[in-house]
Image: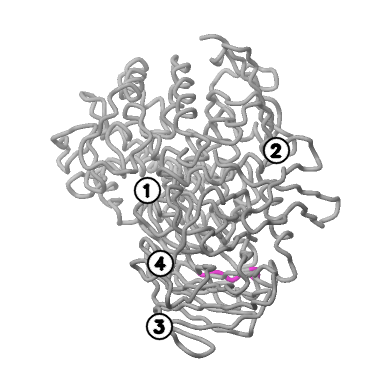
Amino acid sequence: MKQTIKRRLLIGISTTLLVVGCASSAKKASISKAVSTESPEHAVVDYVDPFIGTGGHGHTFPGALVPFGMVQLSPDNPSKGWDWTSGYHYSDDTLVGFSHTHLSGTGVGDLLDILFMPFNGDYSERDKDEKGRIFTHYSHDNEAASPGYYQLYLPDEKVNVELTATRRGGMHKYDFEEKSERQLLIDLAYAQNYDKPVVSFMRVVDENTVVGYRLSTGWARNQPVYFKAVFNQPFNYQFYDDQKAVDGHNIQAEKTQLVLNFNVNTSLPVEAKVALSYVSIEGAEANFAAELANRTFDNIRGAAELAWANQLSKFEVKDSNVKNKTKFYTALYHSFVAPQTFNDVNGDYFGADGATHNDTTFERNSLFSLWDTFRAQQPLITLSNPERVDDIVKSLLAFYDETGLLPSWDLMSNETDVMIGYHAVPVLVDAYLKGLTTADPSHIYQAIKTSAMQDKFGIDLYRQYGYIPSELELEAVSKTLEYAYDDWAIAQMAKALGKQSDYTMFSERANSYRTLFDQSTGFMRGRDADGNWVTPFNPTYVEHRKTDYTEANAWQYTFFVPHDVDGLKAIFGGESQFVAKLDELFSTSSELQGDVSPDISGLIGQYAHGNEPVHHVAYLYAFTDSKHSGEDRIKEIRDTMYLAQPDGLAGNDDLGQMSAWYAFSAIGFYPMNPVGGEFVLGTPEFEEVSLSFGEQPFVVKRNTIEGNEYVKEVRLNGQLLETPIITYAQLVQGGELEFIMHDK
């Protein structure tokens, strides 16, 4: 496992933060143990390894950020394919620079805006790759990362790089060994994956300051980003237009670069403070003044670590297993990357209608991968950060107001239309039912009903037929099942608001899953408009965006009825048949037929943990007499699909959904149905976890002796639980949940 860089914090009773032990050598940042003055134990940040998920198909990045921050300052490798969507892959050793925006764990790539690259030699004479970019090589032996901090030594450039971040800004420190070679490239032409610059602009304001913007298109079709960069030393400079030198104090073109040359008569590291805005240069300047001005690198780094420590310490683990604690706290870390802050400090934000808006009553958020995150990542935020839920709700509603529809996959205020369902609905309904939003209930209801009554994406067919006919719409089975769940969520809010006719209508639509169940095969299958089963049928067959299933096959979608487990058991013919099918899912051959998408990964039988539709399935056993089989599956998934190493995630982290599954499942319960406040009990990973969500801690304990690995009974505050459910209200009230274990 990659060792994270550690530091010591001294936190006083005032708001002053003093950071020591941050000196760096030319080759590698110094390493010291991070210990809070509050406890002799390791600080929670010590258990975070940002390199987990940067290998394999995890698609995470190791760079510096704060929880839910606008800026993700991280290294970039030249893209070599799908596994480089975050800009970085642990298998690589080639660097093209450090950009300020990154996506964590997504299956599509974008961002990577405002690239900085320190280098030596003549820029015009440097070797460049096939896209005209200078590059250099590095070793992971000279690389380190921890929450809010990243460090890398570049031997060919003879410079040690350190990065840290605020919510809307980043800070760079470049310690050059060769004082005659102190150069930095700012590259707005840099683009990878689907991203492409449309126009970019830079202006040298004075000998220490650069401002500019980059307008690009790609997965996010309309993406502006503005910046202000201030350096601690004066510079000489040269502009380039697509590698061709251009004179002047400013430049505007499609592909702009700026090379800065710094004073060779000083040994001080070059430091750069960079603030971003998605609205304007003036917004970047305001963000700079609020978050970066008059602050040192060590102060910003210390504050970033403290922000993470405060976020992660809401979960206090008592257990001796360091690897499992590393997996757990890293999973939490990845769960709190998104959604991200999207407004400036003055309340300005770039709306989904392409206009600038201002609202100081809430913090506009963006980056919602809702097909993934509604399942566990959003419920985790609801528990750990209830104060953020109102901002999330109002951000989703603002998107609706600006476009006429709720977002399905919001990337920088762009609807990408990349996945299925209208899964802003369960997020909004859950927030309303839990009383976590001040938004007008009629506004929420109008938005969720409008999404359900639109005529795009087969929803008109779904209303007409009671399912989506396969010949009329791709991914018909998956869409029908996902729409049915969202409709169940709408029904719950309709009921709460006394809208009886809507409650009846959406409850009936929530039962649409029954129309697609073929009892003769035991699978959810496609039907044509005449009601005939689609043939040929092979439950192991997959073909990306060309079948009845979304990034999955019949095995992986048949169990997606999280809102009606009793109904699902009934259509199988009863509990024994249902359990037999669950067992077969995990025990059958893992062989897949067709043009297999890399999204379908992490296979146990035909269970594919590397993608989201199955994430609730192991918890279905809790509603049967075979709950111990579910415990076995949960433990198997935890142990084999999550490892404390770079390739330690079974699939894309998908903005924290994969990680949130582990976090919940390690604690001992999971939001199988993410709406309504019920969590299904599983089996705890740790001896004890204390959750600081409400006024009083909620403590989860595993009462066991060696060899007793199965749950015999569960007690809440000493009282035996008769059902496998713990509620949101019980969690936030505080108390003790005790799992009493025995030998199966």
Q: Mark 2 and mark 1 in contact (Cβ < 8 Å)?
A: no
Q: Nearer the viewer, mark 1 or mark 2?
A: 2
Residue visible at 30% across and 39% down in the picture:
552
Q: Secondary structure at mark 3?
A: strand
Instruction: Tell me the number on the disc at residue 244.
Output: 3
Q: Is residue 130 left or right of residue 437?
A: left
Instruction: Tell me the number on the disc at residue 692.
Output: 2
**Mark nearer the N terminus (3 vs 4):** 4
Residue type at the position of mark 1:
Gly
Spatial CA span between label 1 and label 4:
30 Å
Q: Nearer the viewer, mark 4 or mark 2?
A: 4
Where residue 282 appears, as percent x and y from the top left, is: 60, 78
User: Image quadrant of residue 293?
Assistant: bottom right
Q: Secondary structure at mark 1?
A: loop
Where residue 312 appears, as percent x and y from the top left, is: 65, 43
Q: Which residue is mark 4?
A: 191
Q: Which residue is mark 1?
A: 421
Verify whether residue 124 appears in magenta: no
